[in-house]
Image: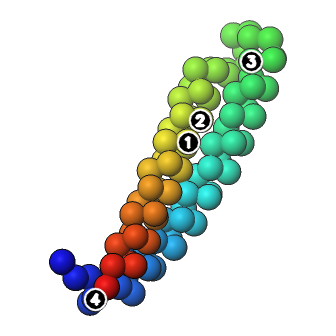
Amino acid sequence: MTFGAYNDRLWCFAVVFGGVSVVAMLIARRSWQHFQDALKAPLTPYTGDVPYQREWDFRYWRRMARVTAGLSILLSILWLIP
């Protein structure tokens, strides 16, 4: 199977997914820091902070970073196929 007609698109998508992966990992790291800070703070009914929601947010962004990194690697490999 040849991807000759799609080589430019494969490379562009690989670069875009790589960039999205980096951004998602940065958001995941920031979400993890917020989650750790929320665990250190005393929980009161007035703070309105929900630690499990922050944990879910961290896991979502980390998963998004891994999936987009995998897509970037896959598209880069397909781009190398003549």
How far apart marks 1 and 3 lie (CA) works out to 19 Å
The x and y percentages for residue 62 are 55, 42
> Could you tell me which secondary element the residue under label 2 belongs to?
helix
Which callout, 4 or 2, points to the residue nearer the camera? 4
Badge 1 element = helix
The reply to whether discs 3 and 2 touch (Cβ–Cβ < 8 Å) is: no
Residue in the picture at 54% in, 34% down: 59
State if disc 2 and disc 1 touch (CB < 8 Å): yes
- The x and y percentages for residue 76 are 43, 71
Q: Which residue is mark 4?
A: 4
Tell me how far mark 4 sits from mark 2, CA to CA. Answer: 39 Å
- Residue 44 locus on image (x, y percent): 74, 9
Image color mode: rainbow
Answer with left or right where residue 60 lies relative to residue 75.
right
Q: Residue at x 81, y 17 (%)?
A: 41
| Residue at x 50% of width, y 48% of height | 66
Q: Amino acid at mark 3?
A: Leu
- Return the residue at label 2: 58
CA–CA distance in space, label 3 to label 4: 52 Å
Q: Point out the image quarter for the C terminus.
A: bottom left
For label 4, the crowd category at 10 Å Cα-Cα, with few meaning under 14, some 14 to 19 and many 20 or more, is: few
- Left or right of 41: which side holds 22? left
Note whether 64 is above or below 18 in the view shown. Answer: above
Residue 62, numbered circle:
1
Residue bearing the label numbered 3: 39
How far apart are labels 1 and 4 at the CA level?
A: 33 Å
